[in-house]
C-alpha cells in the first residue's frame, strides 16, 4: 500500500467528480456545512446521528452499517472518497470505521473541506440522489480497534500515543480549546503515553505532511516501531487521523485506534493517570 | 461533541452554563480584511510554542471564540488568498482581539 492508494489530492478529486464507481462522502458532526455547500455529487454522513448507536455508547452494528450504506447508495465495489471539516477529523474517523467494517476501496481527500475552500474550488447546494444498493459489510476488524482493558494492559508494554493538544495531555484542559470544557471525570493522560498532537501530522491547510516528515515526527517522539501502537484522543476522531498517518501512510503494521479514548479512560475507576 | 461549534454572530458575553468566567479563559474576536468582517475563515488557536490547539470557522460576521486557559496565544486566520495572525495575552474571563488578514 502506498500514499496514492489511500490519499487523493484536491486536483485528483476535481478531475474525478461524477466518475462512475467513485462516491464522494462528506462526514461532519455538524452537517449544516454540507447543506450550505458540498462537493458536487457527494453524499453526507452525520458522524453522530448515523455512525453512533443512538442509545449505547458504541458504533452501529454490522446490520446497521449495511442498511446505512445501502440507503446512501454506496456499493461494495465503489471507491469511497471521504472528506470533511475540522481538518478531516471525522473523515479520518469514517475512513477507519469503513475499514473496521471491511470496505475495500476507501480514500481520504487530502486537506478535506479546508483545502478545497482555501483553493476556492466549486461547491454546490444541489442535493445528491443515488440509487439504493444492497451493501454487505464484514464483521468488525478488531485488529484496528482497541478496547479499555487492552489499553490498561498496554501501559509500559506498547506504544500509547496521546494525540490531544499539550494542554489536554497535561490535564490543564479537558477538551479542545474551541469547546466548552466538559467531558471525563479526571484530566490527564495514560501513564507512559507519548504526546504527539495530531496536528503535527498536518500542514496548516489540513493536508498531511510528507512520509519523511511523518516518519521523523514519530521516531523523534520516541515511538518504538518494534512494538504495537494504540492511539487515543478524547473521543477517537483525532486519533483516527493519527491512526491513518501511522497505519495507512507509513504502513506501520500493528496500530489500533482506541475510540473510547479519554472520555472513557478518564472516567474509569481505579486506573492510573498522570498529569503534566 | 468534538466538532467546531457554529460561531456566534456577535461578540456578546453569554456563556454556556458549564463555563465559569472566573476560571475559564475565553478568547474571542473578529477576522477582518480591509476593515470588513471575513466570514468562513479558518481560525486557528496556537499556544505559546506555536503548537496548534484548536480551529473554528468564523461566523457570517467574522466572529470566533475559543475556550482556553490563561497564557500567551496566537490566533491565526486563513481565507482564500489571505492570512494573518494576532498575539493574545489571555487572563481569566474574556480577552478580545481582531485578526487582520491580507
Image: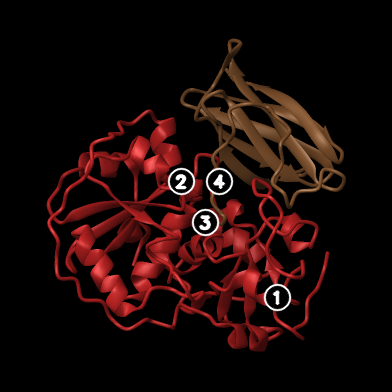
Chain colours: A red, B brown
Element under disc 2 = loop
Chain ID of residue with mark 1: A
Q: Tell me the crowding category of disc 2: few under 14, some 14 to 19, or many 20 or more residues within 10 angstroms, Cα based.
A: many
Residue occupying image coordinates x 64% and y 85%: A154
Identify the element where label 4 is drawn.
loop
Q: Is residue A128 above or below residue A241?
A: above
Helix, strand or loop under label 3: helix
Q: Which label lies toward us, 3 or 4?
A: 4
Dot 1 corresponds to which residue?
A267
B27 left or right of A13?
A: right
Question: Label 4: which residue?
Answer: B4
Return the mark for residue B48: none
Q: Classify residue A225 as left or right of residue A6.
A: right
Q: Looking at the picture, how far across and down is residue B13, in whole percent? A: 73, 33
Say which mark, if any, is on residue A85. 2
User: Which chain is home to disc 3?
Assistant: A
Q: Whole-percent x and y of residue A91?
A: 41, 56
| Discs 4 and 1 carry the same chain letter | no
Amino acid at each position: 500500500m502506498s500514499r496514492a492508494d489511500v490519499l487523493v489530492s484536491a486536483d485528483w478529486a476535481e478531475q474525478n467528480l461524477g466518475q462512475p464507481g467513485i462516491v464522494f462522502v462528506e462526514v461532519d458532526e455538524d452537517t449544516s456545512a454540507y447543506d450550505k455547500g458540498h462537493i458536487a455529487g457527494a453524499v453526507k454522513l452525520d458522524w453522530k446521528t448515523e455512525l453512533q448507536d443512538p442509545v449505547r455508547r458504541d458504533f452501529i452494528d454490522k446490520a446497521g452499517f449495511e442498511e446505512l450504506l445501502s440507503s446512501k447508495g454506496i456499493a461494495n465495489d465503489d471507491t469511497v472518497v471521504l472528506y470533511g471539516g475540522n481538518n478531516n477529523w471525522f473523515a479520518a474517523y469514517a475512513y477507519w470505521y469503513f475499514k473496521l467494517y471491511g470496505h475495500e476501496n476507501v480514500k481520504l481527500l487530502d486537506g478535506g473541506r479546508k483545502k478545497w475552500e482555501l483553493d476556492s474550488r466549486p461547491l454546490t447546494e444541489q442535493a445528491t440522489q443515488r440509487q439504493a444498493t444492497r451493501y454487505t459489510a464484514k464483521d468488525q476488524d478488531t485488529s484496528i480497534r482497541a478496547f479499555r482493558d487492552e489499553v490498561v494492559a498496554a501501559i509500559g508494554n506498547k506504544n500509547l500515543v496521546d494525540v490531544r493538544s499539550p494542554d489536554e495531555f497535561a490535564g490543564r484542559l479537558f477538551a479542545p480549546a474551541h469547546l466548552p470544557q466538559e467531558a471525563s471525570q479526571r484530566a490527564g493522560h495514560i501513564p507512559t503515553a507519548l504526546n504527539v498532537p495530531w496536528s503535527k501530522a498536518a500542514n496548516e491547510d489540513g493536508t498531511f505532511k510528507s512520509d519523511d516528515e511523518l516518519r521523523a515526527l514519530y521516531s523523534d517522539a520516541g515511538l518504538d516501531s518494534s512494538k504495537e501502537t494504540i492511539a487515543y484522543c478524547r473521543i477517537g476522531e483525532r486519533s483516527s487521523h493519527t491512526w491513518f498517518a501511522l497505519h495507512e501512510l507509513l504502513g506501520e503494521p500493528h496500530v489500533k485506534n482506541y475510540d473510547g479514548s479519554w472520555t472513557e479512560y478518564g472516567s474509569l475507576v481505579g486506573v492510573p493517570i498522570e498529569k503534566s | 461533541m468534538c466538532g467546531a461549534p457554529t460561531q456566534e454572530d456577535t461578540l456578546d458575553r453569554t456563556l454556556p452554563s458549564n463555563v465559569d468566567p472566573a476560571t475559564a479563559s475565553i478568547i474571542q474576536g473578529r477576522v477582518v480584511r480591509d476593515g470588513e468582517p471575513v466570514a468562513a475563515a479558518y481560525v486557528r488557536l496556537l499556544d505559546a510554542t506555536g503548537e496548534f490547539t484548536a480551529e473554528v470557522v468564523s461566523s457570517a460576521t467574522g466572529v470566533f471564540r475559543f475556550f482556553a486557559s490563561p497564557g500567551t496565544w496566537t490566533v491565526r486566520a486563513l481565507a482564500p488568498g489571505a492570512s494573518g495572525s494576532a498575539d493574545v495575552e489571555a487572563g481569566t474571563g474574556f480577552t478580545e482581539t481582531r485578526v487582520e488578514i491580507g
